[in-house]
Amino acid sequence: MQIKYSRTPIIPTPPITTEDERKSTKAATNKDLEYVVSKWSLQQCTMGMTISVPIVCEKANIITQELGCSSFKASNAWLRYSKFYRGVRELELSSVKLLADSKAAVSFIEKFKVI
C-alpha cells in the first residue's frame, strides 16, 4: 500500500547504448609471448613446480628479450589482463589438488600397512 500512495517520481532508465559505444576487450599484442609463457607455465605445473606471479613475470621478461621485443616489460597488471592468466590460476589450483591427493594416498598406504 505504501508504494501505491508514494509521490516520488520513477527514476528514468539510461538510454540503450549502440554497439559502437560499448567497450570491448583488446586482442593480445604479444600473442607469441603469451603462447610461450603459457606453455612454460603448463610444463612447470606438470613437473610439480609451484609458480607465482613474480616468477611468471620474470620468465616473461626473459622470453621477451629472446624474442627481441625490447619495449615490453612484464608486470602484475600485464599478467592480470592477459588471457592466459585464468589458465595459470587453474593450473595452480590443480597442482595443489594433486599434492593433496598424493598426501592422502601416502597416508592411506601407511594405514593399509598397519592393517
Image (cartoon, rainbow, N blue to C red):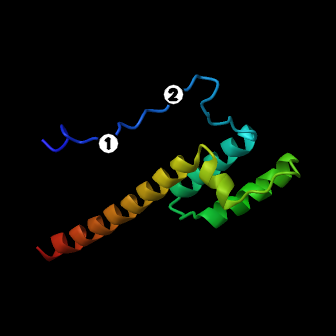
Image marks 1 and 2: residues in contact by CB distance under 8 Å: no
Front-most of residues 66 and 31: 31
Front-most of residues 25 and 44: 25
Residue under numbered circle 1: 8
How far across and down, in percent of the image, does residue 30 sit?
A: 75, 41
User: With 28 as the anchor, is 92 left or right in this view?
Assistant: left
User: With 51 as the anchor, is 5 left or right in this view?
Assistant: left
Helix or strand or loop: what does disc 1 sit on? loop
Q: Looking at the image, which residue is at 63% across and 46% down?
A: 82
Please state which amino acid type lies under the numbered disc 2: Pro
The circle drawn on residue 34 is none
User: With 17 as the anchor, is 26 left or right in this view?
Assistant: right
How far across and down, in percent of the image, does residue 63 sit?
A: 77, 53
Q: Residues within 10 Å of mark 1 (few under 14, many from 20)?
A: few
Examine the image and state in which quarter residue 62 appears.
bottom right
Q: Earlier in the sequence, mark 1 or mark 2?
A: 1
Q: Looking at the image, which residue is at 23% across and 68% down?
A: 109
Q: Is residue 81 above or below residue 5?
A: below
Q: Looking at the image, which residue is at 67% across and 41% down?
A: 35
Q: Looking at the image, which residue is at 86% across and 48% down?
A: 69
Residue under numbered circle 2: 15
Q: Is residue 58 above or below residue 25?
A: below
